[in-house]
Each structure stands twice: as C-alpha cells, then as structure tokens.
Image (cartoon, grey):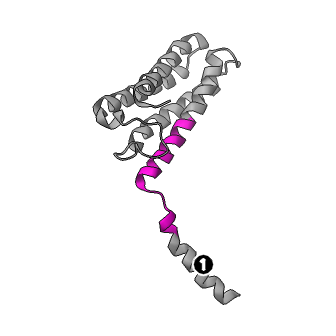
C-alpha cells in the first residue's frame, strides 16, 4: 500500500498546474474578494449613517480605514483579459481605461477623506462624506459594471 502512495502523490502533485487558474482568473477572484470586503465595511458604516445601527465613532473609523486600505488594491486587479469569465466587469473598462483609472483614483481619494474625517467626526459630519464615497462607487458601477 505504501509503495503505491508515493507514485499516486507525485501524480497528483504534478497534475496541480493543470488545475491552476489563469492570471486573469486570479485577478477576477482577487477583485471580487476586495469588493466584498469593501461592501462589508461600507454596509457597517451605512447602517450607522442611515441610523439603523447605533453610531460608534471607533467602529466607523475602523471601517473607513479598511476601505481606505483596500481601495488602492483594486486597480491592480483589472489586467487586460480579465473581462472574460465570472465577472461583472464590462469591456468598457479597458476601452476607456483612462476614465476608469481616474474614477478609481477619485474613489481612493474619497476613501482617504472619509477616513480622515472619521478620526474626529460626528455622525452629522460623516454622513455627507460617506454619501460622497457611495457616489464614487456608483459613478464607476453605473458605467463599468453589469448588474
């Protein structure tokens, strides 16, 4: 039994590259993960902004920091060719890359502004900043994401 285990193990190990994802599939998977994390963090802040959850300044600040940290990572997960397969990303991203990149930068800037405001902000001062962040999300999604 043991002498059959080694060849079987080696065979499985050598076949792993055949099951490996392409770089484009990896990019899609990573951007989905990043967007899911951003969505989770914005939903926590959104609950506070809509007064569905009690305002907790420390929690809001933590969630704003998470979004500000994740936002710059998004742009590296849109390589050419990653518009195929399991993605809602529209080909318009790569057809209008300069505009898409500008929208990503604007989202990153607003995420940083929200984080800075969250350090000392009250719910009343954070509501408009959070609204601007959501507007940045929507500006990109309306043009570059299939729903």
x, y (%) of residue 54?
A: 71, 18
Q: In front: 22, or 85?
A: 85
Is residue 50 shown left or right of residue 16? right
**The N terminus lies in which quarter of the figure?**
bottom right
Q: Which residue is mark 1?
A: 9
x, y (%) of residue 5?
A: 65, 83
Secondary element at tag 1: helix
Q: Is residue 25 above or below residue 47?
A: below
Instruction: Please check the rendered image and state whether residue 29 is part of the magenta-colored stretch, yes or no.
Output: yes
**Res 113 seen here:** no
Instruction: Please check the rendered image and state whether residue 140 is part of the magenta-colored stretch, yes or no.
Output: no
Q: Is residue 97 above or below residue 130?
A: below
x, y (%) of residue 16?
A: 52, 68
Q: Quadrant of residue 104?
A: top left
Is residue 31 shown left or right of residue 79? right
Part of the protein shown in magenta: 16-37
Instruction: Look at the magenta stretch and give its main secondary structure.
Output: helix
Which residue is painted at 30% across and 32% down in the image? 96
Is residue 104 shown left or right of residue 7? left
Which residue is painted at 69% across and 87% down in the image? 2
x, y (%) of residue 72?
A: 42, 37
Which residue is painted at 40% across and 45% down in the image? 82
**Res 77 seen here:** yes
Q: In front: 41, or 10?
A: 10
Q: Quadrant of residue 11?
A: bottom right
């Amino acid at each position: 039994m043991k002498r059959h285990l080694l060849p079987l193990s080696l065979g499985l190990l050598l076949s792993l590259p055949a099951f490996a994802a392409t770089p484009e599939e990896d990019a899609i998977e990573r951007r989905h993960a990043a967007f899911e994390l951003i969505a989770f963090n914005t939903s926590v802040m959104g609950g506070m902004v809509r007064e569905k959850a009690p305002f907790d300044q420390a929690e809001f600040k933590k969630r704003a920091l998470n979004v500000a940290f994740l936002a710059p990572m998004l742009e590296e997960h849109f390589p050419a060719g990653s518009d195929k397969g399991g993605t809602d990303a529209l080909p318009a991203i790569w057809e209008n890359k300069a505009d898409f990149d500008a929208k990503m930068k604007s989202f990153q800037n607003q995420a940083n502004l929200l984080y800075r405001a969250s350090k000392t902000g009250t719910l009343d001062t954070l509501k408009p900043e959070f609204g601007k962040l959501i507007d940045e999300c929507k500006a990109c999604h309306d043009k570059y994401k299939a729903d």
